[in-house]
Image (cartoon, rainbow, N blue to C red):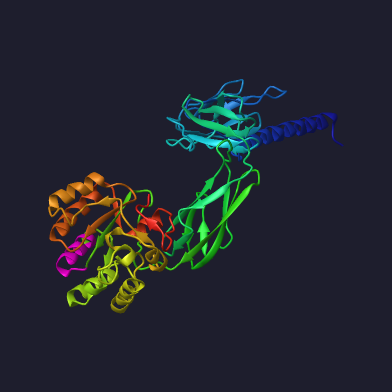
């Protein structure tokens, strides 16, 4: 039978064992906490501070990477240098990612309009850092909008306001907002209601002057024929028709129909509708010796023009080859009557149709523009020419001025966007002027085109029997 002292010794050993186990459990628990996944994560920029939210009980804070981020006893974090760190907030673990301090901040929209009741969220970003949070916003101007801490703007009244976004280290950017009334109607206009495969176009949304809509959706009802993006840029996919619909933020909408067709041989699809264009036209040819020089000059400079051909001049073999070359190289054919003998009311239907037949016979293509001899019109011409009537607004008078240098400077002096130049491809001095003036115009920023290209890229549909002096 064991003594009382033995029982006391066993009890003491048991108590000590429990204390030891508890101590080991605390150590293991602390070790597990130190290596556990974080409970949350915070992103900061170098030099930024962050106050950890207070709790009812006293929380002990500790940074495991003080060279990256420090924390004081009250939970105030300070980002010291770029990198990743972890802090302890009581039993919680928080990952802190520190990025380079912003050097600037950018807003994509420097100025825009909104309608009353419309909402839009600004998206500022820092171009020279991965840190893109923690922005603050300030309003100045009319009481036209409200903005929350996330940059969400609500337009509340007509007026003008400036929004300034700031980073924690006082980098700023601003945008100007004009608030207009909700639109009661909108309309659409396209660069062309006929698009060629391989080309591109654009749709424009027209909103009344005192109204606005920042968020306006644009959709195609037939994307197998025509696609459209948020900027209104049109991409033809296949021949056919499609309706483009635009809808303002308040539900007001408008539609337009666009046809996609095969590209004619004389239209190039790589021109820039935003750059100035000038169309060259040549009458009275062909004359192989001078016409070929002119064709050489245009081909060398990736330019195009329109030739108004006199039908009976194409029976000479060299001249016939000129017409075939025009078609092969993508120049536009025009009708300048069959024999250039009649003017104005004297021009007959036969004068017109015989030239059409002759061009079709030798090239497989008829004329797509008409120029009356001497520029004189008549009802017979308007009713039977079968093409737009193209006159001019830049007359070089090269038939009278046989000085290539003077012609060169005359064209440069009178050149204008949308202009139509009148020349004659039968004179050596004209060929000389063209050889020098075409590259110069291109150097000056012009695209040198034929009349059909000028109309297409200016968004104008030319009608048969109608007269055009220029296409601005």
- 13 relative position to 428: left or right: right
Of 220 and 33, nearer the camera is: 220
Q: Residue furthest front?
A: 346
Task: Return the x and y of residue 440 as percentages of the image width and height.
Answer: 21, 49
- 458 relative position to 216: left or right: left
The magenta stretch spans residue 292: yes
Q: Is residue 80 above or below residue 311?
A: above
Task: Return the x and y of residue 150 as percentages of the image width and height.
Answer: 60, 33
Of 356 and 154, nearer the camera is: 356
Of 62 and 44, nearer the camera is: 44
**Residue at 35 percent of width and 64 percent of height:** 369
Task: Return the x and y of residue 356 as percentages of the image width and height.
Answer: 33, 73
The magenta stretch spans residue 364: no
Instruction: Please count the marks in the image.
Output: 0
Q: Is residue 251 above or below residue 361?
A: above
**Residue at 52 percent of width and 65 percent of height:** 225
Answer yes or no: is residue 184 visible: yes
The stretch in magenta equals 286-299
Q: Residue furthest bottom?
A: 361
- 221 relative position to 129: left or right: right
For the N terminus, the quadrant is top right
Answer yes or no: is residue 223 visible: no
Of 249 and 321, nearer the camera is: 321
Q: Residue furthest right?
A: 1
- 6 relative position to 72: left or right: right
Main secondary structure of the magenta stretch = helix
Rendered image quadrant of residue 365: bottom left
């Amino acid at each position: 039978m064991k003594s009382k002292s033995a029982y006391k010794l066993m009890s003491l050993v048991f108590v000590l064992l429990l204390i030891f186990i508890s101590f080991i459990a605390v150590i293991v628990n602390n070790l597990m906490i130190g290596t556990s996944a974080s409970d949350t994560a915070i992103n900061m920029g170098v030099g930024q501070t962050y106050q950890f939210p207070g709790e009812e009980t006293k929380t002990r804070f500790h940074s495991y990477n003080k060279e990256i981020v420090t924390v004081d006893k009250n939970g105030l974090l300070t980002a010291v240098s770029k990198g990743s760190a972890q802090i302890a907030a009581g039993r919680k673990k928080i990952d802190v990612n520190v990025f380079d301090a912003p050097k600037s901040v950018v807003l994509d929209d420097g100025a825009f309009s909104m309608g009353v009741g419309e909402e839009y969220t600004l998206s500022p970003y820092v171009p020279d850092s991965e840190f893109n949070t923690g922005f603050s916003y300030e309003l100045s101007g009319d009481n036209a909008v409200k903005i929350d801490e996330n940059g969400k703007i609500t337009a509340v009244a007509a007026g003008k306001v400036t929004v300034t976004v700031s980073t924690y280290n006082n980098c700023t950017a601003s945008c100007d907002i004009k608030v207009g009334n909700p639109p009661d109607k909108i309309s659409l206009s396209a660069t062309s209601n006929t698009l060629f495969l391989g080309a591109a176009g654009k749709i424009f949304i027209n909103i009344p002057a005192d109204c606005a809509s920042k968020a306006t959706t644009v959709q195609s009802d037939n994307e197998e024929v025509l696609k459209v993006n948020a900027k209104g840029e049109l991409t033809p996919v296949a021949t056919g028709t499609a309706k483009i619909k635009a809808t303002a933020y308040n539900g007001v909408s408008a539609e337009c129909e666009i046809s996609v067709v095969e590209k004619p041989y004389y239209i190039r699809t790589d021109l820039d509708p935003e750059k100035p264009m000038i169309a060259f036209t040549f009458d009275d040819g062909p004359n192989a010796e001078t016409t070929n020089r002119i064709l050489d000059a245009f081909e060398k400079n990736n330019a195009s023009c329109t030739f108004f051909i006199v039908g009976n001049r194409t029976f000479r073999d060299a001249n016939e080859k000129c017409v075939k070359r025009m078609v092969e190289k993508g120049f536009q054919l025009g009708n300048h009557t069959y024999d250039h003998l009649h003017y104005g009311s004297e021009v007959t239907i036969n004068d017109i149709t015989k030239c059409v037949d002759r061009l079709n016979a030798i090239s497989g293509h008829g004329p797509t523009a008409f120029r009356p001899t001497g520029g004189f019109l008549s009802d017979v011409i308007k009713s039977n020419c079968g093409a737009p009537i193209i006159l001019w607004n830049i007359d070089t008078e090269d038939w009278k001025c046989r000085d290539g240098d003077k012609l060169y400077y005359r064209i440069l002096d009178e050149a204008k966007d949308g202009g139509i130049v009148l020349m004659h491809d039968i004179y050596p001095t004209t060929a000389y002027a063209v050889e020098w003036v075409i590259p110069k115009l291109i150097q000056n920023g012009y695209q040198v085109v034929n009349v059909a290209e000028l109309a297409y890229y200016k968004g104008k549909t030319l009608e048969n029997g109608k007269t055009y002096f220029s296409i601005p």
